[in-house]
Amino acid sequence: MIKPLADRVLIKMVEAEETTKSGIILSSGSKEKPQIAEVVAVGPGGEKDGKEVKMYIKEGDKVIINKYSGTEVKYEGTEYTIVKQEDVLAIVE
């Protein structure tokens, strides 16, 4: 198991949909990198610039992240990304 440190969040990208809302089927070449991810694990928080960093994201949340942020890792055949909490733009409800 990967346990993120400090204000880091371990996420797994959600697969992009194959069709648009209007029913148009997308070819694999026209798909963009998905930006919605599921939170797998959350670090304990910590201190940044002398201030406490509280973790407001929790395991199981669906989040939107910056397009090219984070560090990609492959663990036991599954691809994950580790991002800082500040790289999370929104929580999807």
Image (spheres, rainbow, N blue to C red):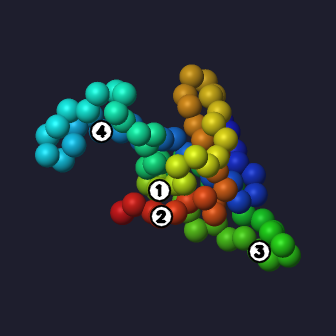
Residue under the image location 17 percent in, 37 percent down: 24
Q: Secondary structure at mark 2?
A: strand
Quadrant hosting residue 31: top left
Q: Nearer the viewer, mark 2 or mark 3?
A: 2
The numbered mark at residue 17 is: 4
C-alpha gap between disc 1 and disc 3:
22 Å
Q: Nearer the viewer, mark 4 or mark 1?
A: 4
The numbered mark at residue 71 is: none
Q: Residues within 10 Å of mark 2 (few under 14, many from 20)?
A: few
Q: Tag 3: residue type? A: Glu
Q: Are marks 2 and 4 in contact (CB under 8 Å)?
A: no
Q: Which residue is mark 3?
A: 52
Q: Secondary structure at mark 3?
A: strand
Q: Point out residue 56 in the picture as x, y percentages from the top left corner.
A: 58, 68
Q: Are marks 1 and 2 in contact (CB under 8 Å)?
A: yes
Q: Which residue is nearer to you in this view: 48 or 52?
A: 48
| Res 34 seen here | yes
Q: Which residue is mark 2?
A: 90
Residue under the image location 58 percent in, 37 percent down: 80
Q: Nearer the viewer, mark 1 or mark 3?
A: 1
Q: Which residue is nearer to you in this view: 17 or 4?
A: 17
Is residue 73 depicted above or below 42 in this figure? above
Specify which label sits upstream in the sequence, 2 or 3: 3
Q: Tag 4: residue type? A: Glu
Q: Nearer the viewer, mark 3 or mark 4?
A: 4
Quadrant hosting residue 93: bottom left
C-alpha gap between disc 4 and disc 1:
16 Å
Q: Secondary structure at mark 1?
A: strand
Specify which label sits upstream in the sequence, 2 or 4: 4
Q: Which residue is mark 1?
A: 63
